[in-house]
Image: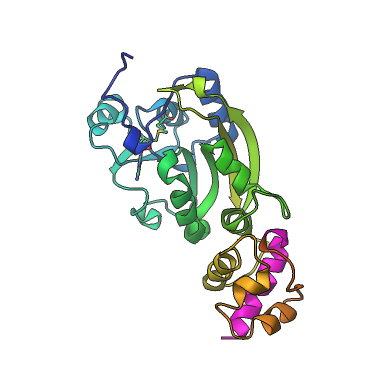
Amino acid sequence: MKSKGPFAKRSLGQNFLVDQDVIEKILGALDPTRNDIILEIGPGRGALTEKLIETAAKVYALEFDRDLAPLLREKFAKHENFSLIEGDALKVDFGSLDRGDRKLRLIANLPYNISTAILQRLFSSTDIIEDCVLMFQREVVERITAAPATSDRGFLSVLAQAYFNVDRLFDVPPSAFRPSPKVWSSVVRCVPRSDLVFDHSQLEPIVSRSFSQRRKTIFNNLKQWYSDAEELLSNAGIDPKRRAETLTIDEWICLAAASKATL
Ligand code: SAM
């Protein structure tokens, strides 16, 4: 395929959006205003970036592929509200971006190979995030949004739903991208939750340990890690015979609090 700019790199999850209706829909989901501070992860050839800049919001575009930097500069450097950051979304400190007293609004058609790793990084930045509109592979969104007692419920569902209110917005077909991926994508809106209080350092280990073997009960998973696993579950009001995928977010938070108390 002939395209403007360097060839797409599969290793960097480069599937560029070409469908203008989908681009408008993603932009509409964020609905930026001129006072916003926006971080776009992986601007690629600038399909979303261009529209973001038009809104007069401050736009930080964080791109790992140095071959794309000249193209992005050529297109957008003349706009004062645009800043290109050449870096890795898994390493850049989002808190270091100049944003005055405002929080960041995130937008991304995420590189699929590291999309869940990027999402997990956002869990520790919820205090500086206003909201995010993110595109993932559809099966990842099914995991992120899975309800208790469903087959997709796992570590990522629990963590994502503890840190964010997650809304699945719409699906995007492979034909919206060049090159076309093999699978469908989905767009979600994630807004940091302010209604839950929990110790972040306790939640992640207990969820991960509870899901270590899906077919086992939560007690059988936790007893490998906690000598008092039975008491821990009883303190959190959780039947030891249940499986991890059946717990609600409120129950996970009780369990995290109980695990802290037993240390
Ligand atoms: N936003 C563009 C679009 O929608 O057409 C490109 C999306 S493409 C799916 C993902 C983009 O993320 C690519 O431009 C890729 O180079 C970039 N990327 C890959 N790994 C990255 C990383 N670790 N940090 C920042 N950007 C990355």
Q: Where, by quadrant of the figure, is residue 197 drawn? A: bottom right
Q: Position of residue 115 (x, y in %)?
A: 46, 45
Of the 4 image quadrants, the one containing the C terminus is bottom right
The dominant secondary structure in magenta is: helix
From the viewer's perspective, is 98 left or right of 204?
left
Q: Position of residue 50 (x, y in %)?
A: 40, 26
From the viewer's perspective, is 28 left or right of 78?
right
Q: Is residue 169 above or below residue 255?
A: above
Magenta part of the protein: which range?
Answer: 245-263
Q: Is residue 252 magenta?
A: yes
Q: Residue at 48% across / 39% down in the picture?
A: 107
Q: Is residue 156 magenta?
A: no
Q: Where, by quadrant of the figure, is residue 243 drawn? A: bottom right
Q: Residue furthest front?
A: 215
Q: Residue at 58% across / 58% down in the picture?
A: 155
Q: Residue furthest top?
A: 2
In terms of depth relative to the viewer, which is nearer, 101 or 175? 175
Q: Position of residue 224 (x, y in %)?
A: 56, 77
Q: Position of residue 246 (x, y in %)?
A: 73, 60
Q: Is residue 218 above or below residue 174?
A: below
In terms of depth relative to the viewer, which is nearer, 48 or 258? 258
